[in-house]
């Protein structure tokens, strides 16, 4: 079955450490997205990519970085510059604009 | 910029009662509209979508939504709530040609036995 796979399910970060969240899709979708979800705040867009080797900042990109070297992969790195990284991170993809997004099951990041 | 308002961060109903979750958007041009459901510690799943084919849209799990242009609304309903409907519901709006949907803050549906 096609879908989006996020790993790991749970992740812990030490002070000053960078961590990378994985997102892989086999839906052949062009667009991919990273969202951060905090209680009561809905989804906030971190980065998105419409095509391979191209990506744009979303509303809360500071302290995060991404790459899009392959169509099926869109990893997110939470850098040490992100001072409040504890949140639920969701990766999504869509076939093109105006189409529904497909979501992974999320990664919950906590601070040690 | 597009904005999406979901009235009520929490909605509580009894099992078997009508479910009504409200969503209003700001665009004057009819956008693309979506409702998603999120169960605890999971991603979002598409419930239904409006893409101008019909104003009343039927989705999965017995949910439906009606697009009302004059009210810029896309409220989600279900005639009879089930315990398994307890979840977080998100309304999302995408302007024509845009890759970036705008999400509402979500409404938590609580179903009492």
Image (spheres, coloured by chain):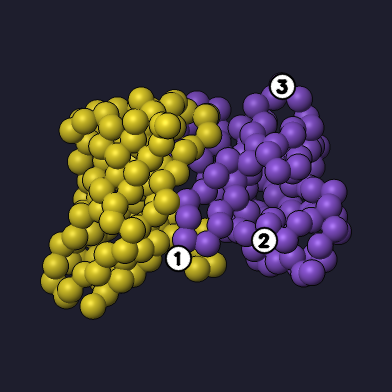
Chain colours: A yellow, B purple
Among all residues in the image, which is located at the extreme front? A1
> What kind of element bears circle 1?
loop
Gap in Å between the C-alphas at discs 1 and 3?
34 Å
Among all residues in the image, which is located at the extreme bottom? A112
Q: Do badges 1 and 2 share one subunit?
A: no
Q: Earlier in the sequence, mark 3 or mark 2?
A: 3
* Residue on which disc 3 sits: B53
Where residue B81 sits, quadrant-wise, is bottom right
* Residue on which disc 2 sits: B86
Q: Are marks 3 and 2 in contact (CB under 8 Å)?
A: no
Where B77 falls versus B34 (above or below)?
Answer: below
Where A94 falls versus A44 (above or below)?
Answer: above
Gap in Å between the C-alphas at discs 3 and 2?
29 Å
Horizontal and vertical percent for residue B14?
82, 66
Nearest the eye: B61 or A56: B61
Give the label on residue B64, or none: none
Residue drawn 78% across and 30% down? Answer: B55
Q: Are marks 1 and 2 in contact (CB under 8 Å)?
A: no
Residue A89 visible in the current orientation: yes
Horizontal and vertical percent for residue A88?
39, 61
> Circle 1 marks a residue in which chain?
A
Where A100 falls versus B45 (above or below)?
Answer: above
Residue drawn 61% across and 58% down? Answer: B88
Mark 2, Cα crowd under 10 Å, few <14 / some 14-19 / many 20+, is many
Q: Nearer the viewer, mark 1 or mark 2?
A: 2
Locate the C terminus of chain A by quadrant: bottom left
* Residue on which disc 1 sits: A38
Q: Is residue A14 left or right of residue B37?
A: left
Horizontal and vertical percent for residue B8?
70, 64
Horizontal and vertical percent for residue B105?
57, 58
């Amino acid at each position: 079955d096609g879908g989006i796979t996020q790993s790991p399910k749970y992740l812990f970060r030490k002070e000053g450490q960078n961590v990378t969240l994985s997102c892989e899709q086999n839906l052949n979708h062009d667009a991919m997205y990273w969202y951060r979800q905090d209680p009561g705040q809905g989804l906030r867009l971190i980065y998105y990519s419409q095509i391979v080797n191209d990506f744009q900042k979303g509303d809360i990109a500071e302290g995060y970085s991404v790459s899009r070297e392959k169509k099926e992969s869109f990893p997110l790195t939470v850098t040490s510059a992100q001072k409040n990284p504890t949140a639920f991170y969701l990766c999504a993809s869509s076939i093109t604009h105006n189409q529904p997004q497909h979501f992974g099951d999320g990664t919950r990041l906590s601070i040690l | 910029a597009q904005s999406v308002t979901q009235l009520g961060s929490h909605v509580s109903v009894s099992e078997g009662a009508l479910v009504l979750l409200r969503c209003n958007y700001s665009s004057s041009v009819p956008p693309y509209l979506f409702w998603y459901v999120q169960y605890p510690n999971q991603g979002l799943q598409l419930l239904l979508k409006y893409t101008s084919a019909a104003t009343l849209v039927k989705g999965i799990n017995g949910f439906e939504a009606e697009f009302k242009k004059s009210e810029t609304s896309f409220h989600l309903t279900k005639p009879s709530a089930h315990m398994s409907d307890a979840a977080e519901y998100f309304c999302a709006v995408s302007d024509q040609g845009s890759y970036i949907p705008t999400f509402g803050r979500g409404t938590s549906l609580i179903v009492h036995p």
